[in-house]
Image: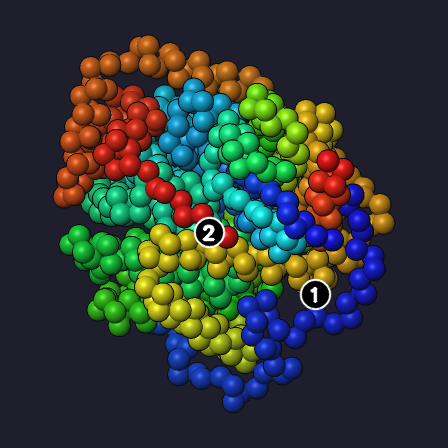
Amino acid sequence: MNKPHTELAEPNQPSLKTPSGIEAPEVATADMVHPEGIGAPGEYPFTRGIFDNGYRGRLWTFRQYSGFGSAEETNERYKFLINQGQTGLSVALDLPTQCGYDPTDPMASSEVGKVGVPIATLADAEILFDGLDLAKLSTSFTINGTAAIIYAMYLAVADKRGIPRAKLTGTIQNDILKEYVARGTWIFPVRPSMRLIADSVMYSNEQTPRFNPISIAGAHVRDAGCTAVEEMAYTLANAFAYVDELVRRGGDPNAFAKRLSFFFYVHMDFFEEICKFRAARRYWAKQLKARYGVTDDKALMFRFGVVCGGSSLTAEQPYNNIVRVGIENMAAVFGGAQSIFTCAFDEAFQIPTETSAEIALRTQQIVAYESGISRTVDPLGGSYYVEWLTDRMEEEMEKVMAEIDEYGGTVQAIEDGYLQMRIARRALERKLDTDKGDRVVVGVNHFRHEEERNELGEVFRMNPEAVKTVVERYHHVKATRDNAAVERTLAALAAASATDDVNLMPLLVDCCHAYATVGEMVDTLKREWGEFEEPVRL
Amino acid sequence: MSLAGKRILIAKPGLDGHDVGAKIIALALRDAGAEVIYTGLRKSPQYIARVAVEEDVDAVGLSILSGSHVDLVRDTVRHLREAQGGNIKIFVGGTIPQEDVEPLMSSGAAGVFNASQRIEDVVAEVDRLLDDA
């Protein structure tokens, strides 16, 4: 069934175009570079990075994405990773939690604990962070549709443990626009979702000033199939939509922009990946200044985390993925990332085992402490090719953003399904290029084994008892909590959601403290706002 | 090879939102001549079975990347049979570990595909499965 692609000729030279379609020069020369547009590290427009001392002041955060089974098991994995030298947590949540269903909901039944940890009530969150010092550890949550609720849970855990909110650091992804486009964990229609995001950003700026209340993500559209240029352009277009919403609600961009952060994939084309970050960082600073009059340097800084791996990894010859992730990790460092997640080599097809998760973390430690590439700030700055490609990528990003503007803006393009269709077509193109062998993937379309060999030593096995633990705790919480308090806090949430000018965050925190479930909070909001109707266009 | 005259439903059961594989296959099958309907995200096996029968399709393609494929395929097969759609072929794509292929086939799937297979091979296999019908 799985025919080997041996009839493809072996590639004898790399492609002359970058994956974004930019014709690369054979040799880059001094006359191709515009030194006046580059600037110094830590200075506007930040082409060379946001810090004048690069990684000398602080290394990037090693942030391995993890979560599965139950809060108990995930808590154990976090402690393992921290003992191995991980420096920040990254919480993977299961799909019922991400889509707003309780673990007993018929929609959730087969998905509890599968792709992440379930958090149904504060009781789960308390166990998840048990024994972890939240005043010191920064915690990132890949959560979107229910981001405001999970952020409220985190605040409630801190409150109960007596940790001052102002000490909390971390990030919630909280980027709903790309969910409609590529990742699919939307719940509410676009407009009330934008309000929920604005509420959480403004509340966070005030209550948890060291916390990033949004991480505008290009990673998922990229992994779905679009190019590095499109990844940055779509993400910046979404970012400007959030900025517009916050400004409309009275936010001051000189203040809130300090806490906007970004998240991207790093795939295999080394220099394109490095230059996309340099280009986007410069473009963002220039646009915030030009469009919104931002003057504070800290607010102009483009801060981002990355994930290395994803769809650049292959199920075939999985150990090759360790090399891929190593190269991508270096590109992220040359690009100036603030936090890095390196995928485990088996991540293309299973939840990583302890061994594969450890190798992924060791990869970062080798890059950080053995390779020496973080010693000098932006060591590739001034390279004719790097500066030329940075310029070219910035130009291409602007073109893509102009196309979205021409369509009527990113929100319109998403509501109509136009952006989704563009990405699907790009994904088909990429797949056909791979099938033809034009895009070389070692071990998949070139340099294959004649016969498939399963070389994977260790297979991750889900603990079958985990779901039972989760469901039992859920029933126990519902049976023992103060139901009058739950009703009271949910009613207050319902009343406020019918207005447009009350910040919902304090009400969500109250609901969490009362042990209301994620499903109850989401249903309350759904009754007022309805659900997103997905435009299905092919 | 032509899938002209064939009607195929591409569906996303469960909560998994990764739909690019589903869309790629939907576009490729349409390019090969089939009439393709795509359900969109987050559909229950029951809903998928009902649409398949109402739309009188020849095959249903289920795309699942969340690891819940065994339950979701079994449930879809059951609902299809209950809705008198037992003759409709089911194929499955996504992140399916090799050891799960056999259980999926024995619970009623006619074919299981993975991301590294070539589009033309997948389309040819669907064509062959539907010709056997």
Badge nearest the viewer, 2 or 1? 2
Residues packed near mark 2 inside 10 Å, few (<14), some (14 to 19) or many (20 plus): some
Q: Residue B20: percent from the left, percent from the top?
A: 54, 49
- The count of marks equals 2
Task: Please indicate whether residue A358 sits to the left or right of residue A101 in the image.
Answer: right
Query: What numbered label is drawn on residue A365?
Result: none
Q: For residue A168, which quarter of the picture?
A: top left
Is residue A342 among what the camera can see?
Answer: no
Label 2 is found on which chain of the structure?
A
For label 2, the SS is loop
**Quarter of the image with the N terminus of chain A in it:** top right
Q: Residue B54: percent from the left, percent from the top?
A: 51, 33
The disc, 2 or 1, on the residue closer to the chain's N-terminal end is 1
Give the residue pinned by disc 1. A438
Task: Please indicate whether residue A349 sits to the left or right of residue A165 in the image.
Answer: right
Residue type (three-letter) at the residue carrying disc 2: Arg
